[in-house]
Amino acid sequence: MTTVHDTTLKKPLTAVILRRTAIALALFALIIVPAAILLVITKQPSATYASMGALIGAFALLAGGLRIGILTSLVAALLAPLAIVAGLSPITGAVLMILMTLMVGRLSLFGLHRATMLVPIFLAWPMLSPIPWLPRMELGQLKTILTNNGLTLTDALSKAQASGTASTSAGSGTSATTIHHAMVDMRLDTTYLSWVIAFFFLGAIVPVLVLHVVLRKRSLPTPKPNPRSEALNYTITICALTGIAMYYFIDHPKQTSGSFFIATILVLTQVGSDIEWKLTLQRVLGTFGGLLALTGLMALMGQAKYTDVVGIPMPVNLYIVGAVFGVGAIIAKFSPRQWIYYILITPTAALLNAYTMSAASDIGKQRLVDNLVGAALVIVAAGITIGAGRLKSTGTPNETAVASS
């Protein structure tokens, strides 16, 4: 016998795709529009930090509610200038990363680690490769280096670090050294650091408030608490791996995909003794598929083409393609086929961060190694913690989910 809802629940595939596309475009606009407005107001490429803040705020709200969304937005904004300054030294960068992941691990007791995990992930970017504040350097010189020599900002910095203070015969080497010193000064500039706070906070708080109003009549998932022993193992794993990784990448500035490595560790590490191997496999293989897509794209597109946007040289061609992939990634995120999301999000992240990264083809090669090493480290750490947990399980069979403190 046919019931009434048999025909109403099964929507046409076209209608489902159109609905998801509309949602993806709305979310993408929520992420991009605040950054675009701040870019026009300040005429600074670092205004794009607002997009990182938007993702931090949106995920915090969806995973933890309004209170967590507001608090996470504020904490991320206040930590952002500390991340930029900490990036001057491997030890300060490692310590700050450990402190951030320590807080994420602590919140895993209450099931809020997914709501706050994007804070250390996205603050790894300004720590390792901050987007510049242009008044601290000669804009015309920067345009010449980027456009005529086919370099990104990171390429110029790498050349400067390789040559040190020694004189070079190439004009671009001398210019790169000048930019290097300007970038060091920039990390300590009060005006720049103050604007970074504003960029992250405004970018984060807008989607938090908008999504709260839009979703006020919908019930969001309730965070699931975790036992203290499992939260402790999780905390030790992410603190140790990300702290060591941050020290290494600050100490080896030519390894430009360190932020992806940090993200790999935090995304793949799970709380508990039951690892979702299927999901982990989808994440790893999906990322490798994304690297292949990125390599193919760069073979077709070639190098970045810098275009003036409100007087700022920006790799517009890479941004446009990255935005298209970003919309597709958001659509796939709401589908049951998560592996598609991981394929699309890889070129999205690489292309939308093209301003301070090396050539996207090099990002692909380095990220391939990062994902292999990161996944291997997470699996090894998981094996150790699972083994330790099983040895202890006989002594604590009735452990409570969350400590009262």
Image: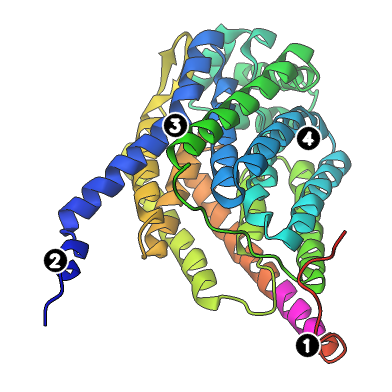
**Mark 1 or mark 4, which has the lower sequence index?**
4
Q: Residues within 10 Å of mark 2 (few under 14, many from 20)?
A: few
Q: N-terminal of the two: label 3 or label 2?
A: 2
Secondary structure mostly seen in the magenta stretch = helix
Q: Is residue 170 rendered to the left or right of residue 235?
A: left
Residue 144's place in the image compared with 154, above or below, is above
Per the rendering, the mark at residue 78 is none
Badge 4: residue crowd in 10 Å (few <14, some 14–19, many ≥20): many
Percent x, y of residue 70: 65, 35
Q: Residue at x 74, y 12 (%)?
A: 191
Viewport quadrant of the C terminus: bottom right
Could you tell me which secondary element the residue under label 4 belongs to?
A: loop
Residue at position x 81%, y 79% in the image = 399
For marks 4 and 2, give the one nearer the viewer. 2
Residue tagged by mark 3? 30
- The span from disc 1 to disc 3 (Cα, nearest Å) is 45 Å
Label 3, residues with CA under 10 Å away: few <14, some 14-19, many ≥20: many
Residue located beneath label 2 in the image: 7
Identity of the amino acid at label 1? Arg
SS for dot 3 = helix
Q: Which residues are magenta?
A: 380-390
Cα–Cα gap, marks 4 and 3:
29 Å
Cα–Cα gap, marks 3 and 2: 34 Å
Query: Which residue lies under the disc numbered 1?
Result: 390
**In the picture shown, does residue 138 fall above or below 226?**
above
SS of the residue under disc 2:
helix
- Asked if residue 73 lies in the magenta stretch, the reply is no
